Image: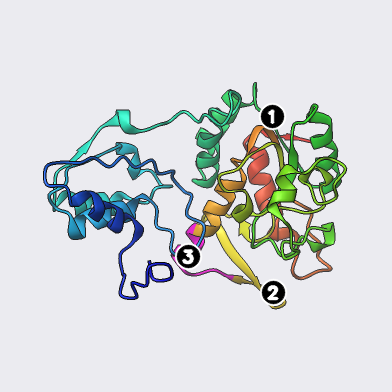
Amino acid sequence: MKQKKGQHDFDYSEPEFLISCLDRHEDWSVIVCLVGGGQEINTGEAGISEWLNAIKEKFHSWEVYISPNLTDSEYQAEEAITDLQKKTTVKLDSSLHLKVSMRSFRAENLSLLVKNILDLDLPSAIQTYSNLSKNYPIVLTREVHKAKEWLKEKARGSERYGIVVSSQAQRLKPFAIDVKSPMNPVHWFLNEKDDVRSSYFLEDVATEFHVQGLELDWACITWDGDLRYSNEGWQSYSFVGKKWQHIHKEERKKYLLNAYRVLLTRARQGMVIVVPEGSNEDHTRRSEFYDSTYNYLKSIGLSEI
């Protein structure tokens, strides 16, 4: 609105502005919001809670019907719901939760498994993976070349495969994975197997910003030391200069966790997860940065290759 319409005093959030447009009707109107959980990966993205906050602050006359599942961890809307209930009518309806993923016939339970993994709910992750593994293979390795071989063996015909990594995964350079290297998502997703710029060539990698909302048939997720498993919960890091630094802001921690949520839900038919071996000769890739994450994923029951 500021750039294209010249309204320099425009200070609405996107949900607030959209609701205001419908609020001009004198009789009634309905807004249907289809909002995924755990998809906020960048500054300024607030998810479903921003819709609820907009109604709480400006549109008290509206009735709100929402899924009770919005209290789950990936939505982070429990506080917003509680505050909204003090201002207007809020009705919970379980039929409003679209719980079955339509990404593919094989991946119906994948989102639930990823939620269990990121919530550190090991018993549920084990059970969900047991149900999922019959139709959706997920394997674990410490070697990138094994992962590449697995992708090529699994893919048939024109089925697309590629390597995806976190945008914070800056210490994968020893494996020829450089998140800072320019890549063109159009070439990566659309070009054929003989094009070095395509995902098929397994040279250029895509980050969560490239693949959000898009899909592959088979994916390799290469896990760096930016997100590390610990008994106290996930530890989040950003590589600055020559060393890893703890991420302290809760918002940035959420973005990193959601980045891995996006990466782990891109494949329609199956995936391989690479958690590389560390190197104690390199202070930025010590074994302890990776081993705990690998052992956690292994404890879920993922097959090793």
User: Is 60 placed above or below 215 here?
Assistant: below
Quadrant where the image shows the C terminus: top right
Residue 242 magenta:
no
Which quarter shows the N terminus? bottom left
User: Does residue 237 lie above or below 158 as drawn?
Assistant: below
Q: Position of residue 295 (x, y in %)?
A: 68, 45
Judged by depth in the image, the label closer to the viewer, 3 or 1, is: 3
Where residue 62 sits: x, y (%)? Answer: 16, 47
How many marks can you see?
3
Which region of the structure is painted magenta? 246-254
Q: Is residue 36 left or right of residue 267?
A: left
Q: How is the image coloured?
A: rainbow
Which residue is denoted by mark 1 in the rendering?
Answer: 137
Would you name the residue on which mark 3 appears? 43
Q: What whole-number distance in Å separates the C-alpha atoms at marks 2 and 1?
A: 35 Å
Residue at the spot 84% in from the left edge and 46% down from the top edge: 201
Give the secondary structure at mark 1: loop
Q: Are marks 2 and 3 in contact (CB under 8 Å)?
A: no
Q: Can residue 231 be seen from the camera position used here?
A: no
Labelled disc at residue 243: 2
**Disc with the residue nearer the chain's start (2 vs 1):** 1
Q: Residues within 10 Å of mark 2 (few under 14, many from 20)?
A: few
Lower position in the chain sequence, tag 2 or tag 3 = 3
The amino acid marked with disc number 1 is Pro
* Residue 11 vertical position relative to residue 146 in the rendered view, above or below: below
Q: Could you tell me residue 288's position as x and y percent?
A: 70, 59
Circle 2: element type: strand
Q: Earlier in the sequence, mark 3 or mark 1?
A: 3
Secondary structure under the numbered disc 3 in the rendered image: loop
